[in-house]
Amino acid sequence: MAVEPYQSPFIDEVDVILDDEWLLRRIYPGFLDWERCDADGRPRVKGGAFQDYGEEQAENLGYEAPAMSVAIRCLVDAVTNPSQLLAAFGPAYGLVAITAGEARVLNQGVMWRPVEGEPWHAVVFDKAVRRRKPAAQSGLALAATQRWVIVPPDPRA
Amino acid sequence: MHLPAGWDSYGAPAVKREAADRTLQLLINVLDEWSALPDLLATSDGGVLLEWFTPDQELRIDVSANGVPTMFYRGSGGTWEGDLDEGSPDVRELIFRITGS
């Protein structure tokens, strides 16, 4: 019996969130690999930083399926600045960016889903499977490693 | 494994006991005294993530919150992704291939 291809409940808003739009994502310190820094001393971002919410959390947040939160940079810049996205967290957290186009190359979609106090909030979701798999997470992390926005201090210093 | 709920800044739950127990059992099974240790991380659903990484190769085992492990390997020969069971590539061999130990 043929298996129906997965149909995401989210909509990839290609006409609203253009390919060159920057999407910001906070990075938990444990997902930074300080043993592998680039020429400018910025750490590698591990694929685990780009996991979707778990099923239970996604449901609690009112999402139709697991997805990953990001902030649309131009909307952040319109009302505040990117550093505010880290203000409630410790100094060891970082902030990276991917473009919507980089996500789409990995078969990800992007949908604007503003939440209270965060008009810039959007979700990135996998178009082919319900919850993003490690290969796509690694691909997003590879792109993000080249687009640091706020690099936390090196914990080894 | 003592991360509080919300550790990732996006509200992830704390690691579940079942995932931690299964991870420990898994490590005992696949590591010997010479093996390179993985990076030990949490997943966004209360599971555990193990990672062995070099720029050319990557092995990742995700243990879900209810203790079910899946594996992802990327190397020169391509990628492999699926449940960690009798049909999966040999984890010890992959660790050796990546880390040389």
Image (cartoon, coloured by chain):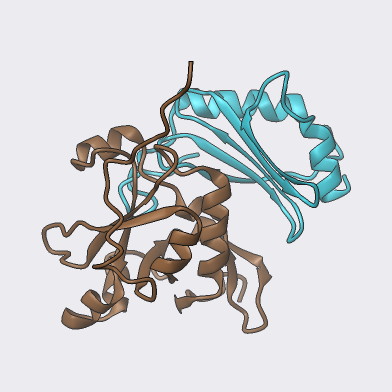
* Outermost residue, left side: A116
In the rendered view, would you say A96 is above or below A62?
below
**Chain seen in cyan:** B
Q: Residue A84: tell me if it is visible.
A: yes
In the rendered view, would you say B88 is above or below A138?
above
Q: Residue B31: tell me if it is visible.
A: no
The quarter holding residue A95 reads bottom left
User: Residue at 72% of width from left, 18% of height from top?
Assistant: B86
The quarter holding residue A41 reads bottom right
The mark tally for this picture is 0
In the rendered view, would you say A88 is above or below B57?
below
Q: Nearer the viewer, residue B30 or A147?
A: A147
Quadrant the C terminus of chain A occupies: bottom right
Give left or right: position of B88 versus A125. right
* Outermost residue, top side: A1
Give left or right: position of A142 versus A101. right
* Outermost residue, front side: A2
The quarter holding residue B33 reads top right
Residue A93 image position (x, y, % from top left): 42, 66
In the rendered view, would you say A108 is above or below A89?
above
Q: Colour of chain A?
A: brown
Residue A152 image position (x, y, % from top left): 47, 74
Residue A108 image position (x, y, % from top left): 42, 54
User: Residue at 67% of width from left, 21% of height from top?
Assistant: B85
Give left or right: position of B17 versus A114. right
Residue A8 image position (x, y, % from top left): 33, 41
Q: Nearer the viewer, residue A28 or A117?
A: A117
User: Residue at 49% of width from left, 76% of height from top?
Assistant: A147
